[in-house]
Amino acid sequence: MHIIFARRGLLLVILLASAITDVRRHRIPNGWILAGLLAGLALAVMEAEPGRAGLAAGGYLFRIIICVSVLFPLFVLRMAGAGDIKLMAVMAGFLGWESGLKAIAYGCVAGACLALIKLLLQKNLWQRLNYLVAYLRRLFLTKEIVPYYRAERDGYGVVLPFAFCLLAGYVGYLLWGV
């Protein structure tokens, strides 16, 4: 029972700290990611049945590796930051496949809502949709991978602090998705 509260509390602290730094600095420090990875690994080993610690650690690390591998193309295209992808992997590692995917999905919904609100407030919804369509068209026609987002070109006005969205998704998961 105490492990469940430790797991939920530790992940909440890691997501909260990551969200604060993402909002303030537009990045997630690797220290928070590393703390999350190590804490999740320690909890996985502590929760394991006797003689199964290695298997539990392997499963935990497998979830981390698969999550980063699947989401890596979003980083290559600069549609998501490396910290966001690593943070989603930490969530999947901590929570397991089903719960982790639920929390991440809630975070993506929160991100979509926040993005829509931001686009409507900035009155640039059509401009950004046209940019996305042009980007995807160029990508498929030329097969040339270029970054979708570049800070020096686009500025930070179009950036979402996605760690904040992941935090909101985790809180939503805790409230409704258990």
Image: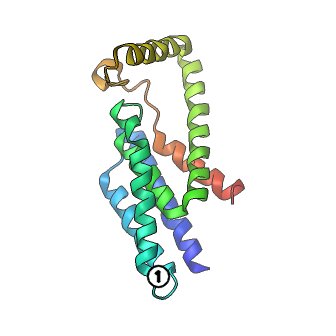
Residue visible at 58% across and 32% down in the picture: 112
Q: Report the number of numbered marks.
A: 1
Residue visible at 58% across and 79% down in the picture: 2
Q: Which image quadrant: the N terminus?
A: bottom right
From this viewpoint, is residue 112 visible? Answer: yes
The scheme the figure's colours follow is rainbow
Quarter occupied by residue 26 = top left
127 or 117, which lies in front? 127
Kind of residue at badge 1: Arg
Q: Secondary structure at mark 1?
A: loop
Residue 107: % across, % down? 57, 44
Residue 28: % across, % down? 36, 47
Q: Residue furthest bottom?
A: 50
Residue 171: % across, % down? 61, 53
Q: Residue furthest left?
A: 152
Whether 66 is drawn above or below 124: the answer is below
65 or 163, which lies in front? 65
Whether 125 is drawn above or below 30: the answer is above
Q: In the rendered view, does 153 fall on the left or right side of 126? A: left
Residue visible at 36% across and 37% down in the picture: 75
Quarter occupied by residue 36 = bottom left
How dense is the environment of label 1, judged by Cα within 10 Å: few (below 14), some, or many (20 and up)?
few
From this viewpoint, is residue 27 visible? Answer: no
Pointer 1 residue: 52
Q: Which image quadrant: the C terminus?
A: bottom right
Whether 49 is drawn above or below 77: the answer is below
